[in-house]
Amino acid sequence: MITRRWIGGAFAAGLALGLGGRALADDDDDDTPQNVFISPCGKPFRAKPTEPYPVAVWFSQANKKGDGKLDRAEFMADTEAFFKILDLNGDGVIDPHEVARYERGIAPEILGFRVKVADARPVGGLWGGRLWRAQIDTPGPIDPGGAEPPEARPPHDIDESGQGASPYGFFSEPEPVMAADENLDGYIRKPAFLRLAGRHFDRLDPDGVGYLTLARLPKTQAQIRVDRYQRHGHRS
């Protein structure tokens, strides 16, 4: 049976392979934690389970001055840059089609898919410098072109646990882009997206020092699991 989740996963895998990703052997242990960080604005960063947690990659990219102090202006600029990536037509609004592209092609972890990181080959940009593909359990190939149009289905189907992106980020937000939908109409407007980012910064800077440091950032649930795996669970 072809489900929305099945179609979404096929789209994610197709996009990844279209970007040059190679098919990997599906022999990974499902208990191996996903080494994934989803930034406050929803941008995913990925690494292999044995590699350092990629929150540092996000921090270094956002901290343009490179001084180890991510200030509010840099934090907001990082958010605005990702909004531009999501806003394909540049109209200042992330519409349901663009939301579906984000959930199915950029951050499929929030739909419950496991994403594998290919051998290191720098590609830069959106995927944190790594190629990736989604691991999808399907009974056979399907044609993504046969999917129902986005307007005929809900733009987001959070994974069955209901946690979505929450384990991979600093906040309990299953869908970090839709978290900025202030009008609850399925459309995310740029001012609302930036307002949410401002609240995020304030929560990460409770003492009001005006900047964030990597050492002071909270650990995500995923980071805790990866740390435990690297200390005790990994067998070479």
Image (cartoon, rainbow, N blue to C red):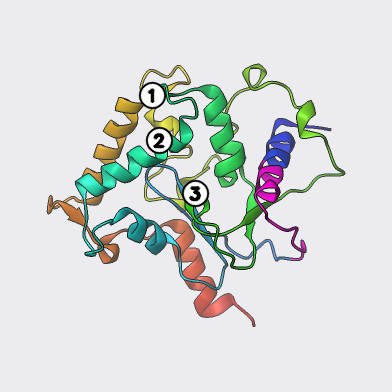
Whole-Å distance between the Cαs marked 2 and 1? 9 Å
Q: Residues within 10 Å of mark 2 (few under 14, many from 20)?
A: many
- Identify the element where label 2 is drawn: helix
Marked residue nearer the N-terminal end (2 or 1) = 2
Can you name the residue that lies furthest to the bottom here? 236
Q: Residues within 10 Å of mark 1 (few under 14, many from 20)?
A: some
Which residue position holds label 1? 92
Q: Residue 129 lies in magenta, yes or no?
A: no
Residue at image x 54%, y 39%?
162
Marked residue nearer the N-terminal end (2 or 3) = 2
In front: 174, or 210? 210
Marked residue nearer the N-terminal end (3 or 1) = 1
Residue 17, given in percent of the width and then of the height, sits at: 70, 50
Considering only vertical position in the picture, is 198 above or below 113?
above
Quadrant in the picture for residue 57: bottom left
Residue 214, given in percent of the width and then of the height, sits at: 29, 63
Whole-Å distance between the Cαs marked 3 and 1? 19 Å
- Identify the element where label 3 is drawn: helix
Q: Is residue 161 visible?
A: no
Residue 87, given in percent of the width and then of the height, sits at: 46, 30
Quarter that holds the C terminus: bottom right
Which residue position holds label 3? 126
Which residue position holds label 2? 83
Q: Residues in magenta?
A: 12-27
Quarter that holds the N terminus: top right
Q: Is residue 145 visible?
A: yes
Quadrant in the picture for residue 67: bottom left
